[in-house]
Image (cartoon, helix red, strand yellow):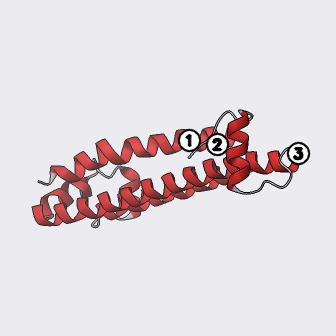
Amino acid sequence: MKEKIKKFEVFILRPAQLILILLVAIFAINKFWFLLVVGIVGLFYLGIIGSNLHPLQSAVDLAKGPLTNPVAKEELKTISPEQSNILVGHACTRVGILLGFGAGVIRQIANRGRCQDVKILIKKKRYKGVGGNNAVSHAKKLGQVKTWIY
């Protein structure tokens, strides 16, 4: 049962951290500043999740390695199986919140791109007197808008 904490950290938190670091690097290279800030906040939140998974370790102990330092070995001996189940359950919930927030940000960015396409079409006055959803459907019928994200 105590291995749940170790497995959760190795198979969930570390890959998530690597993915977030990679995304932050991509956002920095492409100058997506808003997404860069969101990625950095996500990395901090992932760190909070990891630190809450090890309640008996200090920040210095966690910096030495949350699974390999001597305090970590003592922690595994002292935590009961029920406590480890609760800690992993809370960490799973927090990872779900992080994923949901990330999906919401991606959805909002994608939706903003679609709205900008419609605004560009309306600004070019191709559809005088046609606004809102009618402009979208009219543009689709004419085949002038190729990609739409819903």
Q: Amino acid at mark 2?
A: Phe
Report the label total. Answer: 3
Q: Amino acid at mark 3?
A: Lys
Q: Residue at x 30, y 42 (%)?
A: 11
Decide: marks 1, 2 in contact (CB < 8 A)?
yes
Q: Quadrant of the N terminus?
A: bottom left
Q: Residue 48: name its quadrant.
A: bottom left
**Label 3: element kind:** loop
The Cα atoms of the two marked residues, 1 and 2, are separated by 6 Å
Q: On the rendered structure, is 78 left or right of 68?
A: left
The label number, if any, that marks residue 23 in the structure image: 1
Name the N-terminal-most of marks 3 and 1: 1
The Cα atoms of the two marked residues, 3 and 2, are separated by 31 Å
Q: Residue at x 24, y 59 (%)?
A: 88
The label number, if any, that marks residue 136 in the structure image: none
Residue 31 in view in this figure: no
Q: Residue at x 67, y 43 (%)?
A: 28
The Cα atoms of the two marked residues, 3 and 1, are separated by 35 Å
Position of residue 49 measured from the top left corner of the image (x, y, whole percent): 38, 60
Q: Which residue is mark 3?
A: 124
Position of residue 26 measured from the top left corner of the image (x, y, whole percent): 62, 38
Position of residue 12 measured from the top left corner of the image (x, y, whole percent): 33, 46
Q: Nearer the viewer, residue 17 or 139?
A: 139
Q: Which residue is mark 2?
A: 27
Q: Nearer the viewer, residue 126 or 53?
A: 126
Q: Residue 25: name its quadrant.
A: top right
Q: Amino acid at mark 1?
A: Leu
- Mark 1 is surrounded, within 10 Å at the Cα level, by few (under 14), some (14 to 19) or many (20 or more) other residues, namely some
Position of residue 57 measured from the top left corner of the image (x, y, whole percent): 31, 63
**Label 1: element kind:** helix
